[in-house]
Image: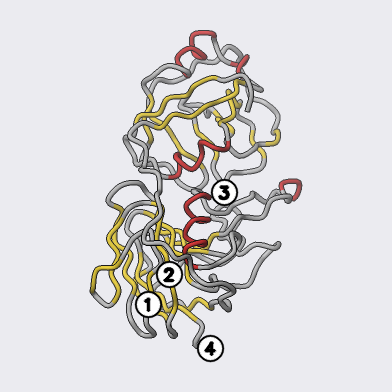
Amino acid sequence: MTDRALVVVRAGVLTTVQDRGRPGYAHLGVPRSGALDAAAAALVNRLAGNPRDAAVLEATLTGCALRPRSTVTVAVGGAPCAVTVGGRPAAWGAPVVVPAGEVLDVGPATAGVRAYVAVSGGVAVEPVLSSRATDLLSGLGPPPLADGMVLPLGTPSATPARVDTAPQPRPPAELVLRVTLGPRDDWFTPEAVRRFTGRGYRVSSASNRIGLRTEGPALERARPGELESEGMVLGAVQVPPDGRPVVFLADHPTTGGYPVIAVVRTADLAAAAQAVPGTPVRFVAVRHR
C-alpha cells in the first residue's frame, strides 16, 4: 500500500479526474474530454508545483473531502468555496500544506459551478489513450469519485508556487458567448437567427459536461427534415427539436444530426463551465473564431 495516495472521504454530487483531455481521437468517436475550466485547472496545477498536464479533481457544486496518506501540497481554485484542513480554515486560490491523515474539505461552491483541486504530484490513475480524464459520455477514464475510493498520486516534480494568492475570474453574472454563425444557420429563419443573437436565454439546470443547455425562445426552422449525421466540434451550438440551443462542451458527442447554428469561440467556454443555472446567456456574432 503506497503512502502517495488520497482517500476519498466525501465524493460530492459529481467529482471527476480531469487533465487536458485526449485530443486527436474524434475519428474514433472519442471526445476530447478534460477540464471544462481549463484555465482554472492550469492555475491550481501551477500553484501546487505541477506541470499543466497533471491530472486534477473537478468537483461540481457540492465540493468534496479528501484525506492524504502522506503530507501533500494542494491548491483549490475555479468556483469560490470554503476550504478547511483538519476542520481549520485554509486558503482558496493559494498553496496549502495538508499533513498526512488530515482531511481537506472543499466546501460547496459559493459562486460558479466547478472547483478544481490540484495535489502535488498530480492524480496518477492509469491513463487511457494518453489521458487520465473521466469522460462521462464514452465511459473512458476512471469512474467519478465515490466515498472510500483511493486515488494514487505521482511524485512531486517542482516546488509549489511562492504566492499568497492568485487572481481568478469571478463566475459570470451574464454569460457572453462570441460565435461564428454556421455551418447550418441557413436551416433557420432570418427571424430565428436574429432571436438567437438577441437576449432572452438562460442557463438550464439540465446542463452538464456534455453540453450547456439553454432556456428561452425556440428557434424556428426554415427547412424540414433532419441532416445526415456529421462531425461535431467543441463549442458547436446544436439546436435539437425543441428549438433551444445547446453549447457542446468537453464530453460532447463527435457526430450529430441536429443542425449547428453557430460555433462558440474556445476562449469563452471556461466561463460557460462556471455559469450557474439561471445565468443570462447572450450569443454575440463575430466574423472569425
Nearer-N-terminus badge (1/3): 1
**Mark 1 vs 2, N-terminal side:** 2
| Residue at 57 percent of width and 54 percent of height | 34
Query: Looking at the picture, does residue 288 appear above or below residue 34?
Result: above
Q: Amino acid at mark 2?
A: Val
Q: Say whether residue 241 is left or right of residue 59.
A: right
Q: Secondary structure at mark 1?
A: strand
Name the amino acid type tagged 1: Val
Q: Secondary structure at mark 3?
A: loop
Q: Which mark is residue 77?
A: none
Q: Which residue is mark 3?
A: 251
Q: Position of residue 86 (x, y in %)?
A: 27, 78
Residue 143, image x, y percentages: 52, 66
Q: CA distance from mark 2 to mark 4?
A: 19 Å
The residues bearing labels 1 and 4 have C-alpha atoms spaced at a distance of 17 Å
Disc sitting over residue 2 in the figure: 4
Few, some or many C-alpha atoms within 10 Å of disc 2 (few <14, some 14-19, many ≥20)? many
Front residue of this view, candidates 163 and 148: 163
Query: Is 88 positioned to the left or the right of 140 in the image?
Result: left
Q: Which residue is mark 1?
A: 98
Q: Which residue is mark 2?
A: 74
CB under 8 Å between callouts 3 and 4? no
Question: From mark 1 to mark 3, how far is it between C-alphas?
Answer: 32 Å
Q: Nearer the viewer, residue 109 or 201?
A: 109
